[in-house]
Image: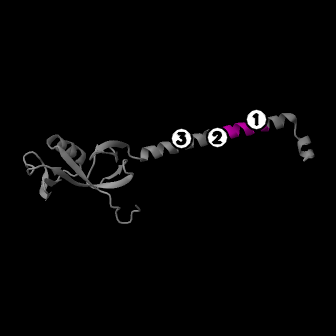
Amino acid sequence: MAALISGCSEHQIVNQQKHDTESEKITKDVITSQKASLKDLKLRGKPKTSLVKINGQQFEINGQALAAGSKVYNTSIGEFGYVTGSFIITSPIKPKLDELTNVVAISNIANEQWRVVTSDVNNLLTWYQQLQSLYAQVEMNINYTPRTGEAK
């Protein structure tokens, strides 16, 4: 080993050390850049979530709209559920069809309880808000039963 070192000039050793240091810095910069790009890809791949109040509880939803079958997260109880596409209205009289557009069915499910199903299944959050402006008590149906093949 001494023969190898003595065969190299001090100038060559210093140059090699500078080269090694520069290579390490470039490698660190590349790794940092790759990590930043990967993080950016992960963020772009995830849909933006929103917090909305449904049925008196806070829910996290993907995006700004809800469609039938959308997966939602109830932050109050810490459970995932799926929007069914129907609503429950509490009213002493049957909701009128002229007040509600795109209604597929209105059925009495209990005393003063009405299930309302809309054909506008891609815009349920807007529908929920419209129903709330017409009726004092409105609930969006959310099913908390895990889907087949899904862990609870």
Please give the name of the residue rendered at 60% of the width and 41% of the height, measured from the top-left corner. Answer: 30
Quarter holding residue 23: top right
Could you give the CA–CA distance between mark 1 and mark 3, rounded to whole angstroms?
Answer: 27 Å
Pointer 2 with pointer 3, Cβ within 8 A = no
**Near-viewer residue (97 or 67):** 97
Residue linked to disc 2 = 28
Colour convention of the picture: one colour
N-term-proximal mark, 1 vs 3: 1
Tell me which amino acid carries mark 1: Lys
Please give the name of the residue rendered at 12% of the width and 58% of the height, measured from the top-left corner. Answer: 107
Please give the name of the residue rendered at 33% of the width and 61% of the height, measured from the top-left corner. Answer: 145
Res. 18 mark: 1
**Near-viewer residue (139 or 120):** 139
Tell me which amino acid carries mark 2: Lys
Tell me which amino acid carries mark 3: Ala
Please give the name of the residue rendered at 53% of the width and 41% of the height, measured from the top-left corner. Answer: 36
Q: Crowding near pointer 1: few (<14 within 10 Å), some, many (20+)? A: few
N-term-proximal mark, 2 vs 1: 1
Res. 36 mark: 3
Image vertical order of residue 123 relative to residue 16, above or below = below
Q: Is residue 64 visible?
A: no
Quarter holding residue 84: bottom left
Residue 150: image x %, image y %?
39, 63
Q: Nearer the viewer, mark 2 or mark 1?
A: 2
Q: Secondary structure at mark 2?
A: helix
Could you give the CA–CA distance between mark 2 and mark 1, rounded to whole angstroms?
Answer: 15 Å
Q: Quadrant of the C terminus?
A: bottom left
Which stretch appears magenta? 16-27
